[in-house]
Amino acid sequence: MLKKNFVLTKECKHIAFIMDGNGRWAKKRGLPRHLGHKEGCKRIIEIARACQEFGVKAMTLYAFSTENWNRPQDEIDNLFNYLDDFFHDNIAEFHEKHIQIRVMGDQSRLPLHTQETLKDAINQTKEYDSLIFNICLNYGSQQEIVRAAKAIAEDYKAGKLSLDDLDKESFNDYLYSAGIPKVDLLIRTSGEQRLSNYLLYQLAYAEFIFTPTYWPDFKRDNLIDCLKEYCNRNRRFGGLENK
Ligand code: IPE
Ligand code: IPE
Ligand code: MG
């Protein structure tokens, strides 16, 4: 099939995704929920390729929230197994394309095999800068902000930080997203229109797109449609000028 050409006409350095709808995708086909996660993992590498192709510098993916521990244990086990497979199957491509892997969230509660996989993936790719591939695992934005506040209090107590030096940029250095450009565009699949404890600080001026497509059906062409819509938005940042 011929690939549609697409060129971004508006700066879009960082896209955040809420990969939602895996379970409903499976249910619609009479399949167990975990097969929706399996299919969803296949879209991750395709969307990463497309982001790189379009010149996006960072992508952040919501893969497992702090609230997702409320799911049945076998769904959780399957999901982390698929994520392990994802990294093992694709690490060569990350090297080839100079993609840096980063993780946001408290990794200490993840299965040990996943912690090992992530440690290797992060170490092996930390010098790359063509695209930041940032995956959120056991991530909750409120917890991230509280963690930052505690670290700030510790640094202040130790005399490493003066309150005059604390502003919205230096606060970001205390978040998992330190050093990553601000989010320009948030895409949530599956029709839900909520943030579900995702990037509350980082999304301050992002454009939001909610698409009904389930994540396992979200392909390069769907991303192009979202980016076209994004390019038609007027980003005013509180001013009057259209950007
Ligand atoms: C998103 O798909 C993946 C995770 C939250 C882990 P869901 O599993 O939430 O799918 P739905 O929303 O039940 O369809
Ligand atoms: C948000 O999806 C978390 C991820 C996509 C990883 P959920 O399916 O968990 O969110 P809610 O429960 O519908 O808000
Ligand atoms: Mg969901």
Image: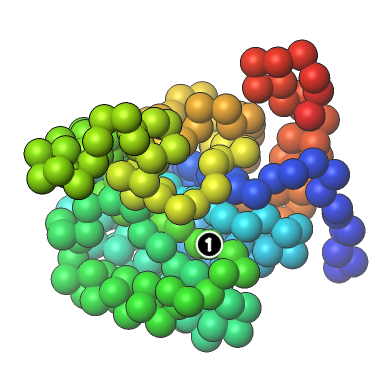
Q: Badge 1: how crowded within 10 Å, few (<14), some, or many (20+)?
A: many
Q: Secondary structure at mark 1?
A: strand
Q: Position of residue 13 (x, y in %)?
A: 65, 49
Residue 157 visible somewhere in the drawing: yes
User: Which one is nearer the viewer's eye here, 225 or 141?
Assistant: 141
Q: Is 195 above or below relative to 30? A: above
Q: Position of residue 1 (x, y in %)?
A: 86, 68
> Which residue in the protein does label 1 denote?
132
Taking 167 as reference, is 75 left or right? left
Q: Position of residue 51 (x, y in %)?
A: 67, 58
Q: Residue at x 29, y 74 (%)?
A: 119
Taking 68 as reference, is 2 left or right? right
Taking 36 as reference, is 218 left or right? right
Q: Position of residue 66 (x, y in %)?
A: 24, 42
Q: Residue at x 16, y 71 (%)?
A: 112
Residue 32 visible somewhere in the drawing: no
Q: Quadrant of the C terminus?
A: top right
Q: Residue at x 79, y 41 (%)?
A: 10
Q: Amino acid at mark 1?
A: Ile
